Image (tube, grey):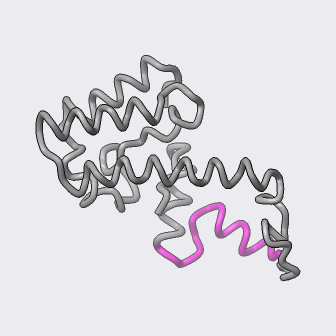
Amino acid sequence: FKGGESAALARVKEYIWDKDLLKAYFETRNGMIGGDYSTKFAPWLAHGNLSPRYVANECHKYEKERIANKSTYWVVFELIWRDFFKFFALKNGNKIFFEGGTIDSDKRWGFDNRHFTAWKEGRTGYPLIDANMRELAGTGFMSNR
């Protein structure tokens, strides 16, 4: 990904308007590898190069000019879900990274270097996990599936 606001706005324009991919987002969003199955707005949103409000406004504009459907709804819904997790993290602070999590669970976790290495390399034998880890290693991006 190329950083910055200009690259972010170019991706919004490409995804929503030029390639007209927004209309099929709901059907393609669970894809795992590739450039256009999902919006791929996350890096720019996370770094503040792209405003969730701007994306939502573009979706509403698209609904007025082209089509309003499940896909346009879900992009905005997932922006709201993203904000929920940001506020959850803000409320709970570093506890989200602690072994006991935000509920102070006393569950004990084990560590097996073989399993850890298989997970890192996308060789767990679980296709969903392996696809995500391979995409992360290859592109720096991981689907939220």
Residue situated in front as seen by the camera: 28 or 56: 56
Choose between 132 and 68: the one closer to the eye.
Answer: 68
Residue lying at 29% horizontally and 52% vertically, measured from the top left: 73
Task: Measuring from the top left, give residue 28's x and y in whole percent.
Answer: 28, 57
122 magenta-colored: yes
Residue 122 x, y percent position in the rendering: 57, 65
State the image quarter where residue 133 is shown: bottom right
What is the span of residues highlighted in magenta in the rendered image?
Answer: 111-127
Q: Residue at x 79, y 67 (%)?
A: 101
Residue 70 inside the magenta-drawn segment: no
Q: Is residue 59 above or below residue 90?
A: above
Image location (x, y in percent) of residue 43: 53, 37
User: Residue, x 82% and y 59% (percent of image)?
Assistant: 95
Residue extending furthest toward the bottom? 107
**Total labels drawn:** 0
Q: Residue 123 sits in which quadrant?
A: bottom right
Q: Residue at x 51, y 60 (%)?
A: 132
Q: Position of residue 96 (x, y in %)?
A: 76, 59
Furthest-left residue in this view:
66
Give the vertical position of 99 relative to 81 (above or below): below
Extreme residue toward the top, this view:
6
